[in-house]
Structures are given as C-alpha cells and as structure tokens.
Image (cartoon, rainbow, N blue to C red):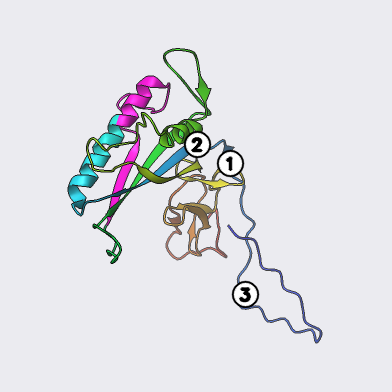
Amino acid sequence: IPGPVIYTCDPVGNWDPERRYTPYRVTPCGAVSAPRRQLVVKILYVVPTTQCPPAQEALERELLNTQKQLNVDWSSVCTASDCSDTVISVTCTVPRRTRRQAQQTTQLAATLTLKDIGEEVVSTSGPTVRMRTEDLYESLIVRTVDNPFDYTRFIVDAVPDSFQLIVEPECDAPKVFHDGQCVSCGPGTYYDSASVSCKFCPVGEYQPDSDQEQCLPCPTATTTRQMGAYSA
C-alpha cells in the first residue's frame, strides 16, 4: 500500500493537492514468513514446420517425460513423483516468411514452471553431486551431446535455440511478496488477487482480521469514517 503524498508549498504559500480531502491511513502490520522459490525455465525451439498443434503436443509430452527422468536422476526436481506439479506450456508462432528463407519455420516457446524448489538437488546415482536447481537446468540445456532437451527424434530440428532461467519468490495467497518476505494483509485491508497486493477496505466496509480476500459491509444505516477501517 503506497504511503502518503507529501506536498511542499511554493514561494507564495499556495498548497493545492489533487486529493486534499483524502485521509491517510497508516498501513497495518501483517505477519511475515519466508517465501518459497519458483524456477521458470523458458526454451525457444525454431523448427521447419507449420503444423502447430502436433508440434505443441509432442513438445509438451516430451518435456514432461524429461522432467520425470530428471526427477529419477536427481532428488526433488519435482515435488510430485509424477511431476504433475510442474506447469508446462508451449506456444506456437509462425512468423512471416522472408524472401531469403528457404523454408517456413515455426517458433515453439516452451515454459516450465517448477514450484517450491529447494536450494539444491542431489544426484541419485554414481558420485554424489550437489547443484542448484537452476544450475542443473542450465548445464543440461547447453549440452552439445546427450542433451535431454534435444527432441529431434520427435520433431525435426527441435534443439534449444535460446533459453532463459528465472528464479522467482513465491507466496501463497492471500499473502503478498514485499521486501524479501511473504506478508499477510493486516486488519483494515484485503487481498486483491488481480493486482496481487493488499488494498484498504473502501469507505462503508471494514475488516477486523488478517489474510482476508474481501471486506465486510457495515451494518444498515452505518458507515466508516475513512478507508482502511478494521471495525464498524
């Protein structure tokens, strides 16, 4: 929740804020907890086909198979044993063909979202190897031999063209991420899922509890003095 706007008078002493009658409510305290880590793996494939649905289907299937195999070779790559917790999506784009291109190509943008990853994964066979999850994926994607993300057996020329790894903090609703921690929306506020933020209850509503997704209407013939009320 943003703080108040502070105004400074000009040399002649004028003060004319746009919302002069809007009262300011001090942001309430909320319980804090450590966020979980989420890894987003984005891989782009450029393949010589215009058949999007079959290519998307095949790529999604093989990405899931790769996840399952990695979960066997490394501890805790997935939370679920069948890797059903890994969110996999593939979008297909057919760019306009240029005169210099010998054939039409299609871009398959794959995204894997690994939720609640640990600080590291450990190999399950051979010498014990410890790696950060993001480092493991980077080392596998850039391989030139035995690359588990090379799917040329199923889709022509389906090798990683480029990739991006993003580690994001993850908080369970109705908590929001702020300053390195997951924070509860305190009394007088509610969790707004659209903006993923805490917002003050509007005038005419109140909320006495934390971690709520809506405010309560005031009793009949009553209202609140200002926004952010925690009692009627």
Q: Is residue 181 above or below residue 51?
A: above
- The magenta stretch is 66-93
Look at discs 3 and 1 and give the one toward the viewer: 1
Task: Point out which mark residue 21 bears.
Answer: 3
Look at discs 3 and 2 and give the one toward the viewer: 2
Query: What is the x, y in percent for residue 182?
Result: 55, 41
User: Which badge, 3 or 1, comes first in the chain's sequence?
Assistant: 3
- SS of the residue under disc 3: loop
Residue at coordinates 55% horizontally, 49% vertically from top-left?
187
As for residue 82 lying within the magenta part, the answer is yes
Query: Closer to the camera, 161 or 89?
Result: 161
Task: Point out which mark residue 98 bears.
Answer: none
Query: Closer to the camera, 97 or 16?
Result: 97
The quarter of the image holding the N terminus is: bottom right
Whether label 3 touches label 2, CB < 8 Å:
no
Residue at coordinates 54% horizontally, 46% vertically from top-left?
177
Query: What is the x, y in percent for residue 4?
Result: 66, 64
Residue at coordinates 45% horizontally, 66% vertically from top-left?
221
User: Which badge, 2 or 1, comes first in the chain's sequence?
Assistant: 2
- SS of the residue under disc 1: strand
Q: Amino acid at mark 1?
A: Gln
Q: Which residue is mark 2?
A: 37
**Residue density around tag 2, few if under 14, some if 14–19, many if 20 or more, within 10 Å:** some
- SS of the residue under disc 2: strand
Farthest-out residue, right:
11
Whether label 3 touches label 1, CB < 8 Å:
no
